[in-house]
Amino acid sequence: MNQTLPNNNTPQKFCSPISSVFLDRLVKILASSQILLNKAQLEAYAWDNTGVRAMPQCVVLAENSEQVAGVLRLCNETGVPIVPRGAGTGNVGGALASFGGVVLSTQRMNKIVEIASDDRLVVVEPGVVNGDLQSALNSYGLFWPPDPSSSKSCTIGGNIAMCSAGPGAVRYGVTRDWVLGLQAVLADGTIINTGGRTSKGVVGYDMTRLLIGSEGTLAVVTQATLKLAPKPTARRLSRVVFSSVAQATKAVAKLMTTGLPLSAIEFLDGASLNLLRQESDLTIPTAGNAMLLLEVAGGDDEIDNYANEVGKCIETFSPLEQTPPVAHEEAQEVWAARYALSPILKKLAPKRINEDVVVPVSQLSLLIEGLEEIALDVNIPIVNFGHAGNGNIHVNLLVDPNDSVIMEKVKPALARIFKLVLKLDGSLSGEHGVGTQKRDYIEWEVGRESILLQRSIKTVFDPKGIMNPGKIFPNV
Amino acid sequence: MNQTLPNNNTPQKFCSPISSVFLDRLVKILASSQILLNKAQLEAYAWDNTGVRAMPQCVVLAENSEQVAGVLRLCNETGVPIVPRGAGTGNVGGALASFGGVVLSTQRMNKIVEIASDDRLVVVEPGVVNGDLQSALNSYGLFWPPDPSSSKSCTIGGNIAMCSAGPGAVRYGVTRDWVLGLQAVLADGTIINTGGRTSKGVVGYDMTRLLIGSEGTLAVVTQATLKLAPKPTARRLSRVVFSSVAQATKAVAKLMTTGLPLSAIEFLDGASLNLLRQESDLTIPTAGNAMLLLEVAGGDDEIDNYANEVGKCIETFSPLEQTPPVAHEEAQEVWAARYALSPILKKLAPKRINEDVVVPVSQLSLLIEGLEEIALDVNIPIVNFGHAGNGNIHVNLLVDPNDSVIMEKVKPALARIFKLVLKLDGSLSGEHGVGTQKRDYIEWEVGRESILLQRSIKTVFDPKGIMNPGKIFPNV
C-alpha cells in the first residue's frame, strides 16, 4: 500500500487570490453570465445547513459536461480548489469552499434527460431537485426511493455526493442502492462513464459506488442513470408510545424480521416527547418515554391487513398507547409531530449541533441511555430522534454559542458521543457524511490504514488535490 | 489521472518455479498439512467451471486472517502470484492460477462466526458454502438473498469476489446489496476493515463495494458481515408460454412496474423450448417461442392474491398457455424444466461456450432476434435462457471443439454478440464477471480511460501486481 501522502492532498492554507490570467481563460469556457465574482452574489454560495460560512472567490454556473471538464482542467492546471455544489442543503460543510477557490454550481444542469419506464430508469442531470424528479415520475406509477427531509430543495447530484437517505431507507436502502450508472468528470477534465442502464453488471470495479458518497473529492458527476421503484398506491401510519426506549427497540427489532412492508420506522426519545408536550397540542401519555411512527406502504387490497399485522406485533410489546392506522390527511398530522421537532429545536437553540449517528438496532436503547448520561454530565440538553429501523439517530445538542462555559464542553461531549457510538458497533454518520465536521474523528472508525488507502485512491483521481480539498480526510 | 501503468500490473510471463527459500518461509507461517505441492493434489485446484486448466505451483489452505496476511506478505516480498479460491464454481477463470504461483484456498475458513438476528446480520468466514449459510438461517426466518445456481457448493467468498447473483436478483438485487462490511488483507499483509454492522453508513469511500466484484485482484476477504432479509413463508410458481419473445418481453416490463413481489422472472427462448420438447416429457404448445417462469413470494395470507394478480396481468398479453400457480413439490417440477437445460446442453455439447450478457428489459426481444441471426450466419446453434426481470441472458454456443471449421468462427461470433449487447445499452456480464474469459472485450464497454483509472486503483492496493494477475484487465 502506498504510505506516502502528497502534501497537497489536503492543502493547509487558503487559496491565493484568483488571477486575471485565470479569469481570462475562464471566460473562454463560460459565458460571463455563468461566472459570479461580486461579494453579494458569492455570499449566496458561502453557506450550507451547518451554519458555517466559507466565501468562495468565484462561482461558476456550468451548463453541460464539456463546460465542467473545461473548468476542472483550468483549475487542475492552475492548482485552484474546486467545490461542486448542489442546493447547499448539506449538514457537514461538504459544499463549502473551505479553502476558497471556485464553487461549481450544478443548478443550471437541471434537465430530466429521459424517463424509460419500461426499464424502470431515469437519466438526469445533477442539478435536478429530488422533489421535482418525484413529481415528474408520478404519472408513471414509479418513484426514486431516496427521500432526505430536504427533498423539496436538495439535488440528485447532492444526494449522490453524500449518499443521502431518509425514512424510506428502512425499506428501500440509500442512494447507493438506486443508481445504475454515472457520467463524471475527473480533475484533469477526463470524462468517464460508470455502470450503465442494466440492474445487473459486474464488468470491472464498482466505480459507480466508489463515486457515490465521495463528497465531490474524486470527480464531478454530470449525469446519472437512476433505478426506479414501483410507487405503492396506499399507506397507513400509526403512532405508538412506550414507557421505555428498551421496549420500543425490542419492538423495532421484531418488526424488522417480519417482512411486513414498513416504509418508515421513526423514533422520538423522551426529551423529544417533552418538547412536543410543551410546544405542540399533541397529548402524549405522561409515562411515555419513547414514540414510534410506523408506516406501511403497499397495494390497496393488502394495506389494511398489513397495518393490522403491525398493530398485532406491537401489542405484544405492551405499548402505553397505539393509535389506529390512518391514511393521507390524518397521516400528515402525525408526521407533522415528527417534523415539528426541527423548527422547535431551531427556536430553542438556533445554533444547535445536529449529529447523525447510527448503531445496530439492538444497541439503540444503550445509545439513548448513554446520550442521556452525557447530557447530564456536561449539562447540555440533548434531544434524539431519527430512523429507528436503521438505528440512525439525529443527536441534537441544544447549545448557546454565546455561553463560553457550555461551548468549552461541546468538543469533549462530541468525542464522548462518538466513542459511545463506536463502542456500540455503530458509525459516525448514517446519512449526512463527513465533510469538514467529522473529519477529525473518522480515524476512530475506519482506522489509519484505511484512511491512507482511501487518500491514495483520491490521489489517483486527483493528483493535485484540487477536488473539494479539506473534506472527509484528517491529516493522519 | 495517472496514465502510466506498472509493467507488473498484469505479468506477461508464467511465474518461475517456487524456490526452496520460499517454501522454508511458508512452513513458518502454515502447518505442512496446509501446504499442497504434489501434482495429484494440485490438479484438484487447476480447474473451474470454464473447462480451462491452469496448474498452480502450490496450494495453501489458510485457516485465519493472520495466516492469510503472512502468505500475502511472503508472496508480495518474493513477487509470487497469489490466486484466492473458493469452491472453483466460477465461469470466467477467476479462481485459476493463469500465471502459476500460489492458490490460496479459503475452504478451511468456513465458520459462521455469529448470527445476530435482532440486527438482521450474520458474520461469516469466506469459505462458508452459500447453501450451508441458508440452512443455518432457516430457524430464524431469515435468509441471505444472493442465490447463484451453484449455491449448494459455491462459497460466500466467491460470491463476494464475483458479485454473484441468481433468479432472486429480480427482487432482492445482487451480492453488493447484501454485504454490510468486510475484513480484508492487502497484498502487503495489511488487514483492513470496511463498512460495519449498520444498514446505513457514509464515513469515507465505499471500500466495501470497491472490493465486491474485484475478483481477488485487490485484496483477500477474510471475514464478511452480511445483511439478511426476512424469508417469505409462501411461494407460487406459474409457467407461461408466448408465441413471440416480443410479447414475453412486454409482459416482463409490465410486471416489473406493478410492485408485485415477484421473486423470479425466468426466461427460455425458442431454441430452449425445442430442446425441452425433444429431451423432456414437458408438453409445450408447438407455436410457443418463449416461456416465462413467474414466481411470487410472500405471506401465507396474501400469496394467492399475488399469484392471481400476476395471472391477470399476463392475460392482457395473450399467452398461448398459462399454468395455474402451484406451490412446493409441483413447483419443483416446473423448476426442473428450467434446470434440466444445462445438463441437456452439456450432453449435446460438452464444451459449450456459456456467455452471460445483460440488456435493459425493453431490449430483450431485439437481443434474442440478433442472437438468432448470428446463429444462422455462423451456423452455430445458440440457446438462450436466463433472468428476464434483469435482462440477464445466458447465451449458450453449442460448439464441438474438435470441429476446427466451427471453432474458427467462434471468436468472431462472440465479438458480434458482445457488439450487439453494447449496441442495445447492455453489459458483457450480469453475474459471471470478467476473469480471463472477457478481459479482451471490456474496453468496448467501460472505455480506455476507465480501465486506466481502475488499473491505477489496483496499483494502490497491489503495487507489485501479485493479486490474481491476468484477471479483468486487458493490456491497454
Image (spheres, coloured by chain):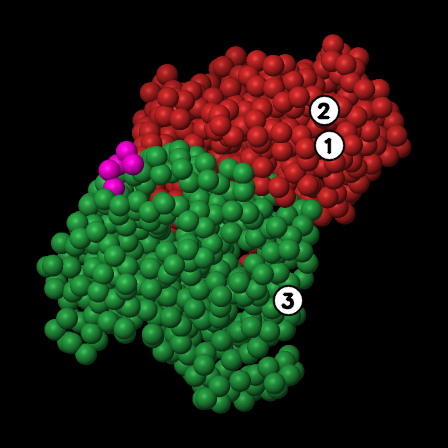
Chain colours: A green, B red
Vertical relation: A30 (above or below) B87: below
Q: Main secondary structure of the magenta part?
A: loop
As drawn, the residue found furthest toward the top would be B281
Asked whether residue A198 is in view, the answer is yes
B455 in relation to B249, above or below: below
Helix, strand or loop at label 1? It is helix
| Disc 2 secondary structure class | strand
Q: Residue at x 43, y 34 (%)?
A: A259
Q: Nearer the viewer, residue A464 or A144?
A: A144
Q: How many marks?
A: 3
> Which chain is indicated by disc 3?
A
Circle 2: residue type: Gln
Ranked by sequence position, the earlier of labels 2 and 1 is 1
Instruction: Give A404 or B290, whichever is nearer the viewer.
Output: B290
Spot occupied by residue A269 in the image (x, y as percentages of width and height): 24, 53
Q: Which residues are magenta?
A: A315-319
The location of residue B238, given as percent across then percent down, is 65, 24
The single residue placed furthest to the right in the displayed view is B377
- Residue B289 at what x, y percent from top left? 81, 27
- Disc 3 target residue: A111
**Crowdedness of circle 2 by 10 Å Cα count: few (<14), some, many (20+)?**
some
Q: Which mark is residue B315?
A: 1
Q: Residues within 10 Å of mark 3 (few under 14, many from 20)?
A: some
The amino acid at mark 1 is Glu
Q: Residue under circle 2?
A: B322
Inspect this view and state whether residue B189 appears.
Answer: no
* Subunit under mark 2: B
Element assignment for label 3: loop
User: How far, Cα to Cα, is label 2 from label 1?
Assistant: 8 Å
Dots 3 and 2 on the same chain: no
